[in-house]
Image (cartoon, rainbow, N blue to C red):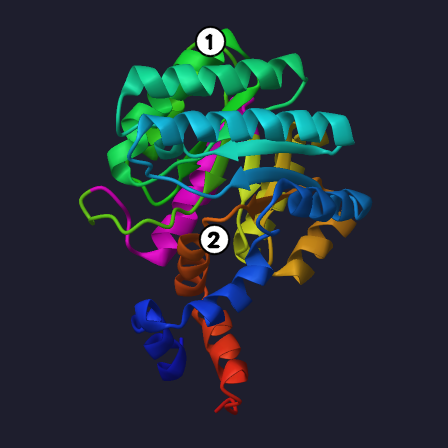
Amino acid sequence: MNLFNKLVVMTMPLVPKALVRRVANRYIAGDTIEDAVRLVRQLNQNGMMATLDILGEHITKKEEATATTESYLAALEVINREKLDSNISIKLTAFGLKLDFDFCLANVRRVVQRAHELDNFVRIDMEDASCTTDTLRVYEVLRQEYRRVGAVIQAYMRRSLPDIRGLMQNGAPANFRICKGIYVESRAIAYKNRELINKNFTYLLTEMLRHGAYVGIATHDERLVWDAMRLIDEMKVSREQYEFQMLLGVDEELRDTIVKAGHRLRVYVPFGKSWYAYSTRRLQENPQIAGYVIQNFFGLKSS
């Protein structure tokens, strides 16, 4: 990261909202479900699958959680009506996880049940470490009732290996998305070294594939993509047992390369009015993009 980009990240809270909105257009389908449908249809035409994420998390009122539930139920109906190749991804803090566990579970159960009825699928996103145990608990309960639900495992968390081993030994077949992890956690619970995180990613992926779990391989790191392809080849993993996953707006060249190589790929498509926090996080995670956008916004030259 050069000095300019580093300064951009450090001063991100001061960035004008209009500038962040410009970046949001790269990472977010739009404000409405209609915006998301148009983008997903285009992705499908280009041989890619999608997962819809309605932006907004860490709600503070049960009424907000109920509204989130209804929005996802409506999204499932739209996906079915429009015949889109897309599932949905949810964050449990938007369903009331921090308010009441049983209330959250009941809300998510409604969505998973409807997805089951519509022959669709729900991915339960992973949030910060304060949510990990309860998130896996919700997944564990619901996968015993419905098969069309999956969880996310973060490679930088030290607990991830025992977590997946426990889940794979317990009942219904496991369905995971594996990613590096983005939240700021303490060294006591999370690896900080990039090389260790990458090694753990490959180690966890190996364990998942070896034990027959379905895996969404979520990464924009071409080294990890190569590792995954090597494992798939060596282990002779069926094309129907895995997929690659990437965020909307990130390394589209690599995305196209994966698809052209014959692998299935799903694009994470966020939409909704709560775009600001998501876009700010994307800028902080991608300082080169942040620096480039700000330089262009103010008419600066790259050094």
Kindly identify the residue that appears in the image at 56 percent across and 46 percent down: 271
- Is 243 placed above or below 120 here? below
Q: Position of residue 194 (x, y in %)?
A: 36, 57
Kindly identify the residue that appears in the image at 35 percent across and 51 percent down: 196
- Is 209 placed above or below 273 here? above
- Residue identifier under label 1: 144
- What segment is highlighted magenta in the picture? 189-214
Extreme right residue here?
Answer: 45
Q: Position of residue 302 (x, y in %)?
A: 51, 89
- Report crowding for label 1: few under 14, some 14 to 19, many 20 or more residues within 10 A (C-alpha): few
Q: How many marks?
A: 2
N-terminal-most mark, 2 or 1: 1
**Residue 27 or residue 197, whichever sits in front:** 27
What's under tag 1, amino acid-wise? Gln
Extreme left residue here?
Answer: 188
> With 236 as the anchor, is 300 left or right in this view?
left
- Residue identifier under label 2: 275
Which label sits on residue 129? none
> Is residue 208 within the magenta segment?
yes
Q: Give the main secondary structure of the magenta stretch.
A: helix
Kindly identify the residue that appears in the image at 42 percent across and 50 percent down: 198
Q: Position of residue 152 (x, y in %)?
A: 44, 33
Q: Is residue 238 visible?
A: no
What's under tag 2, amino acid-wise? Trp
Quadrant in which residue 262 is drawn: top right
